[in-house]
Amino acid sequence: MEQEINFDKKVYDKVLQSNLIDVFNKHHRKDISPHYIERADRNIFAANQIEKTQIERILNLGGGGKRHLQASFSDNNIEVYEVDIQGDCDLKINIDSLEKLPFEDNSFDAVCAFDVLEHLENFHLINEEMFRVSKEYVLVSLPNSATEIFSTVFRNKAQKNPDLDRGVFSYFYGLPLAPPSDRHRWWIYFQDIIRYYYYFSLKNNASIEFWTPKLNLKKKLFKTIFGSHLYHTFFCQHVWIKISK
């Protein structure tokens, strides 16, 4: 156990000394641009990327209980095993209550979680477990929480009906008037995402890719004037991470 802690310390020191924007740029796939609004479109984007790889069996965590990912594949040989807390799924369970995913090592070619992990208290455990049960890679998408500041708060764009389970500005982060049915457990900045998965890849001797939406003209101008740090912190809405063994 002591040896593992020492190894992690060495990896952490390397991450601590790194410029995270440089790390992002080094591992950024500019040819892949995740653009979508609805859950179904998000799954179509994911399916299009997955079909470019030699994948036959997928574990999908928190897919929404409607088998969107399976329906998005044109290849009928790809099988998606769904785990969720509700709806149509293969294993109905609260992921946040797990101490271990109930699968053997390398049970699935790929393991996916799209805008799911930010809802979980056991974020770190589930990331490790996803990597353990995957044979080829893990594919994750996460929202950048700080984009709400300019898109909603700065514009004074208060939430409308229904408002009992929402904060004044934020559905996932505000203080609602009644107990909410759905909350994010983590307020995650862009550089938090880059740092965590860079550390994760080094610790597990894995390769990593970051996918972000391509910039429109307005965002390119903002980035040119104010720099990468401010652009990515406040205007890059989500980050996709592919961790390959």
Image (spheres, helix red, strand yellow):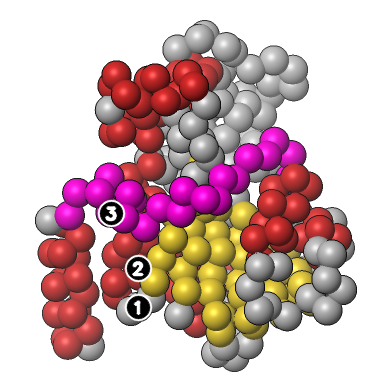
Among the two numbered marks 3 and 2 on one chain, the one whose residue lies closer to the N terminus: 3
Residue at image mark 3:
23
Residue depicted at x 18% and y 80%: 7
Residue at image mark 1:
204
Above/below status of 29 relative to 104: above
Residue depicted at x 55% and y 80%: 136
**Where is residue 81 shown, x and y percent of the image?**
76, 74
Instruction: Please say if the residues under marks 3 and 1 sit with CB atoms less than 8 Å apart.
Output: no
Image-quadrant location for residue 10 = bottom left
Is 22 magenta? The answer is: yes
Disc 1 to disc 2, how far (Cα)?
A: 6 Å
Quadrant (top left/top right/bottom left/bottom right) for the N terminus: bottom left
SS class, disc 2: helix
Instruction: Please say if the residues under marks 1 and 2 sit with CB atoms less than 8 Å apart.
Output: yes
* 10 Å crowding of disc 1: few (<14), some (14-19), many (20+): some
* 10 Å crowding of disc 3: few (<14), some (14-19), many (20+): some
**Where is residue 69 shown, x and y percent of the image?**
77, 60
Viewer-proximal residue among 207 and 13: 207
- Boundaries of the magenta span: 18-39
Residue at image mark 2:
200
Is 102 magenta? The answer is: no
